[in-house]
Amino acid sequence: MDPYFLKTRGATMIRTLAAFLVAPLVPGFLYWLFFSRPWASDGSDLPAFLIYGGIVSYPVMGLVGLPAYFAITANTQLRAKHVLWIGTLTGAAVGLFMSAKEPALTLVALNTFCGFSAGVVFWLIWHRRPQERR
């Protein structure tokens, strides 16, 4: 087997794993920025926001992100538009679900932004640098 293929395939797998592990932490961090006012606190509540965000984000990633990733990469090249649209729409859906009892446009907008931001972080981690392309 071609050593270059193994090297680039391994790097892609590492980046994919890192993107799926790190990107779901973004909504918890953004919630912390929005609700905790970190400039006025010592930041000791950040782990709680990350844990709560992870409790919501990792299952959503498993239910939406992983199947979408495998479906897209099985048929075509993953592009930024795929990641950003899926992240944005998923964030909006979570926001609608969270505000089902009492509709709150602010909550939907915040979750939409969180989903978009998680998509941006995923893309920045996953995307290959030009020198890695063949």
Image: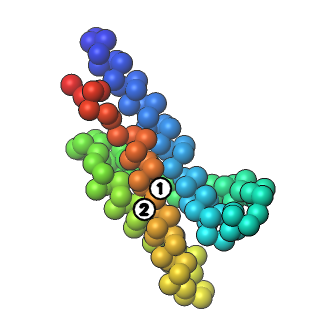
x and y percentages locating residue 65 in the rendered image = 44, 52
Query: Badges 2 and 1: C-beta atoms under 8 Å apart?
Result: yes
Describe residue 134's horizontal placement relative to residue 12 as left or right.
Answer: left
Q: In this view, does 15 lie to the left or right of 78?
A: right
**Quarter of the view holding residue 22:** top right
Q: Which residue is drawn at 46% across and 70% down?
A: 112
96 up-or-down from 21: above or below = below
The N terminus - image quarter: top left
Relative image position of residue 26 (x, y in whole percent): 55, 55
Q: Residue furthest front?
A: 39
Residue 50, image quadrant: bottom right
The amino acid sitting under disc 2 is Phe
Q: How many marks?
A: 2
The crowd level at tag 2 (other Cα within 10 Å; few <14, some 14-19, many 20+) is: many
Q: Mark 2 points at which residue?
A: 116
The image quadrant where one finds the C terminus is top left
On the image, the x and y values in percent for residue 88 come to: 40, 65
Residue under pointer 1: 118
Looking at the image, which residue is at 48% across and 76% down? 109
The residue under label 1 is which amino acid type?
Ala
Alpha carbon distance from label 2 to label 1: 5 Å
